[in-house]
Amino acid sequence: MFNALYPSIIIISFFLLFFGYRFIRGYISVLHFLYWIIFSVYTASLVVYTLFPFPYQKELIEIMIEDNLGMKNNFIPFKAFVDAMNYGSLTIAIKQIGGNILLFMPLGFALPILFPVIKKGKVIVIGFTVSLIIESTQAIASLFLGYNYRSFDIDDLIMNTLGTVIGLLIFNLLSNFLKQSGLLISRETKI
């Protein structure tokens, strides 16, 4: 399996270098720099969790293809949840739903903090787009492997987008407190 450590190091290093430079040059505050570092760890975690480990051993791939062990793509909304409840367990369905929602809540919460002038609708579109890119990458990678190591799942797309919306709602609920505490970056701050 392709080790997920390297992509994490690359992602976090990029954020550190780019925003470290902006901080040193005085373009962003210490608080803004810290928010970007936290966001880099979230981004690296999101990439690692959704796309890795990535199999590259020929023997393993051949076994997976031979034994038809790949996952199935799902293009029917809520099919995976209904199947999990009918043929699996309610616990699996709840974990699937909850995990996908929780995975994207930080994105919905972080974007308005990092980009104070961003519109709410744009946050949701970004959450949807990031989820679509992840699901599409999983599907395309599976095409190259010859079996579905990771699959495209419309339910993941829906729940990830819902997670972004919930994160945004939590931000909206806490925004007055964050402003009063001095934890929000002003709209005039250069990004």
Image (spheres, rainbow, N blue to C red):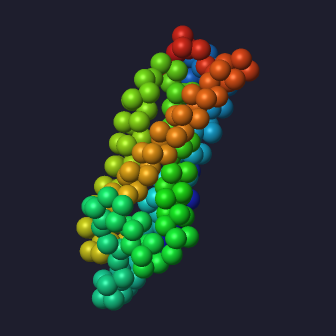
Q: Look at the picture and state if 91 lies above or below 152.
A: below
Position of 39 compared to 129: left or right?
Answer: right
Which one is nearer the viewer's eye here, 102 or 35?
102
Q: Count of labels shown? A: 0
Residue 118, position in %: x, y? 45, 23
> In the image, what residue occupies the spot 47% across and 18% down?
117
> Is 137 in front, or is 99?
99
Question: Quick check: 162 left or right of 36?
Answer: left
Determine the residue positioned at 62% across, 37% down. 37
44 displayed left or right of 142: right
- Outermost residue to the top: 188
Residue drawn at x 32%, y 58% as measured from the top left: 77
Q: Nearer the viewer, residue 85 or 104?
A: 85
Q: Is residue 49 shown above or below 20?
A: below
* Location of residue 138 in the rendering, given as x and y in whole percent from the top left corner: 35, 61
In the image, 60: left or right of 12? left
The part of the image, by quadrant, that contains residue 126 is top left
Q: Position of residue 94 (x, y in %)?
A: 53, 63
- Could you tell me which residue is drawn at 42 percent across and 79 percent down? 87
Residue 66 visible in the current orientation: yes
Residue 2 shows in this picture? no
Q: Residue furthest right?
A: 181
**Depicted 18 relative to depicted 50: above or below:** above
